[in-house]
Structures are given as structure tokens and as C-alpha cells.
Image (spheres, rainbow, N blue to C red):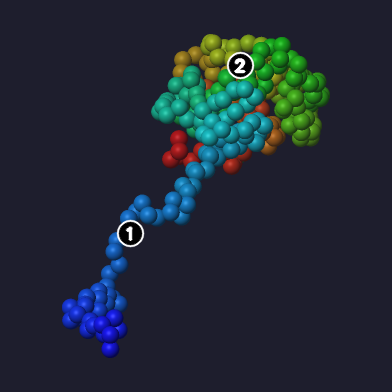
């Protein structure tokens, strides 16, 4: 046999490595190496659930034809925050309210009872910027929004946003006529401030009506500290409240001839829970 065809034996160290140099098998119960958090796909993480807007804010959207922008209310080009983060007394809320402050006191309905708590003035808290955006910036713009409404034998001017509700109140009051409380009216639209203050009266927006002052009571006409009193029949109060009007007789600083169109305060869905106040 020639040298070119002679077989050469495989070296012993090569034969040994074919078997002995293989990696040992991994046990079946061996722990897997830890996976880095960065290796988890981002898309697998659940997105945070946004908090639901407060009930009062949602109701303002519905009753005022506004829209939400996060935790704020937008009316036209104006934006109003729900909560300015400041804890306030009732007097401070009346002087400088945010939207939440208007709901903070709630509004009681049902049987008429004396108001003995000085802090209880539900409905007296009004956000003037919001009212201007919704009902009119000035006397001229409010005047253009007024319509004539037949009311308990009279004809009055009232803002068109509350005109249909006032007409329904009138239909209910017709069943009570004649009654002294409706023989005369104290008025509706009037561009003026609230007596003794520089705050705008609800009458300036055409959303308030005063019944006969001769059978009504007003806290400023009382000497000394106000002591609640009332002569307005419960049936009249019920007729107004059933159509979205708040009554000044529910206030410690009472004005029993005064009824004001504030449907958001009478909507049970809008009431702020005590823990949110």
C-alpha cells in the first residue's frame, strides 16, 4: 500500500474529547435565569385608569351645555377649575368660590324647617365667572336672552335657559290661585348687586324671580343677628323646587321671596359627597 493511502490512527486525545468534552446535561428542575424587567414588553403593561370626574362637574356639563377638559369645565372660550385646593368657610366660599364650592353645602328639599346653622346658605354660593359665561357677560347680552313668560296671572321677562321651567312652575301655581303671595311680584331681571355687597345679584342674569314682598321676610330687615322666619306657603316652595329653582328660605341669611333657577343644585346626581368637600 502506498504512503498516500495508508490509514493514520486518530490521536487518543481527540477520541477522548469527542465524549468527555461535551457539556453536562442540565437537570429538568434547574431554575431558569432571572429575566430583566427591561425585557418585559411595554405594551403588556395595563394603562392607568383615569379617575372619573366629580359628580357635580358631570352635572354642570349636562345642565349648562358645557364640556370637560380634564378636571375643568369649558364654556365657550372660558375654562373653570373644579377645585382650587383651598379649604374655605361658607363666607369664603361665597366671596371666592371654585365650582366645587357651589355644591359643598348641598341643598335640602322636603318639609320646611327653620335654618339655625349660620353656615347653611345653600344656593348663595355663585361662581360669577361661570354665570357670565353661561347667561351673559353684561346687561346687553343678558337682555338679548330674555323672553316673556306668563306667570301666575302676570307676564315676566326671564332668561331663555330657564323660561320653560318657569312656565311649568306657573302651571302648578295656577291650581293655588288666588293666593296673597302671588298677587304682586317683586320682579325678575334687574341689573344690580346684592344688597350690602359688591357681588352680582342673580336677578342681573335674569334667572331669579321674587314673589310678593308684602308676605315675605328678609334677614337684612331684622335688627341684630338674623332669626329665621317664613310666611311663604309650602306648596309654592314645592312647585318651584320641583322645576329646578332654589329658594331663599332654605338659607340662614334668608330671603323668602327669592327663587332662583339652579337645576344643577336640585339634581341628586350632582351632590358632592361629604368626603369630597
Query: Residue 243: image x %, image y %?
Result: 70, 35
Q: In which quarter of the image is residue 124?
A: top right
Q: Which residue lies furthest to the left in this view?
A: 13
Query: Residue 104: image x %, image y %?
Result: 49, 32
In front here: 80 or 271?
80
Query: If the image is split into quadrants, where does the C terminus sit?
Result: top left
Query: Residue 248: image x %, image y %?
Result: 59, 25
In front here: 91 or 116?
91
Q: Which residue is drawn at 27% across and 77% down?
A: 25
Q: Quadrant of residue 86?
A: top left
Quick one: label 2 or label 1, which is nearer the N terminus? 1
Q: Residue furthest front?
A: 2
Q: Residue at x 46, y 15 (%)?
A: 224
Q: Mark 2 Cα within 10 Å, few/some/many (few <14, many 20+)?
A: many
Q: In this view, does 172 lie to the left or right of 264?
A: right
Query: If the image is split into quadrants, where does the N terminus sit?
Result: bottom left
Q: Is residue 277 above or below residue 84?
A: below
Residue 34 appears anywhere in the view: yes
**Mark 2 or 1: the one toward you:** 1
Mark 2 to mark 1: distance in Å? Answer: 67 Å
Q: Circle 2 sits in a helix, a strand or a loop, which is it?
A: loop
Where does label 2 land, which residue? 201
Q: Is residue 32 left or right of residue 159?
A: left
Q: Circle 1 sits in a helix, a strand or a loop, which is it?
A: loop
Residue 122 appears anywhere in the view: no
Residue 35 is labelled as 1
Amino acid at each position: 500500500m502506498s504512503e498516500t493511502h495508508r490509514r493514520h490512527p486518530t490521536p487518543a486525545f481527540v477520541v477522548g474529547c469527542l465524549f468527555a468534552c461535551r457539556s453536562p446535561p442540565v437537570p429538568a428542575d434547574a431554575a431558569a435565569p432571572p429575566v430583566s424587567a427591561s425585557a418585559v414588553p411595554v405594551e403588556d403593561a395595563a394603562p392607568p385608569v383615569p379617575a372619573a370626574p366629580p359628580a357635580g362637574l358631570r352635572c354642570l356639563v349636562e345642565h349648562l351645555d358645557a364640556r370637560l377638559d380634564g378636571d375643568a369645565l369649558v364654556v365657550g372660550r372660558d375654562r373653570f377649575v373644579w377645585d382650587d385646593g383651598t379649604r374655605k368657610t361658607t363666607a369664603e366660599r361665597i366671596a371666592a368660590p371654585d365650582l366645587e364650592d357651589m355644591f359643598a353645602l348641598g341643598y335640602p328639599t322636603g318639609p320646611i324647617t327653620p335654618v339655625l346653622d349660620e353656615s347653611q346658605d345653600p344656593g348663595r354660593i355663585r361662581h360669577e365667572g361661570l354665570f357670565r359665561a353661561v347667561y351673559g357677560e353684561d346687561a346687553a347680552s343678558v337682555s338679548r336672552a330674555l323672553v316673556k313668560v306668563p306667570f301666575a296671572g302676570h307676564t315676566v321677562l326671564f332668561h331663555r335657559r330657564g323660561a320653560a321651567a318657569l312656565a311649568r312652575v306657573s302651571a302648578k301655581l295656577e291650581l293655588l290661585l288666588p293666593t296673597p303671595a302671588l298677587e304682586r311680584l317683586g320682579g325678575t331681571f334687574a341689573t344690580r348687586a346684592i344688597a350690602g355687597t359688591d357681588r352680582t345679584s342673580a336677578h342681573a342674569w335674569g334667572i331669579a324671580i321674587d314673589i310678593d314682598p308684602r308676605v315675605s321676610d328678609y334677614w337684612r330687615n331684622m335688627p341684630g343677628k338674623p332669626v329665621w322666619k317664613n310666611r311663604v306657603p309650602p306648596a309654592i316652595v314645592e312647585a318651584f323646587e320641583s322645576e329646578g329653582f332654589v329658594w331663599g328660605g332654605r338659607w340662614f341669611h334668608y330671603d323668602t321671596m327669592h327663587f332662583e333657577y339652579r337645576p344643577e343644585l336640585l339634581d341628586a346626581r350632582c351632590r358632592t359627597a361629604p368626603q369630597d368637600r
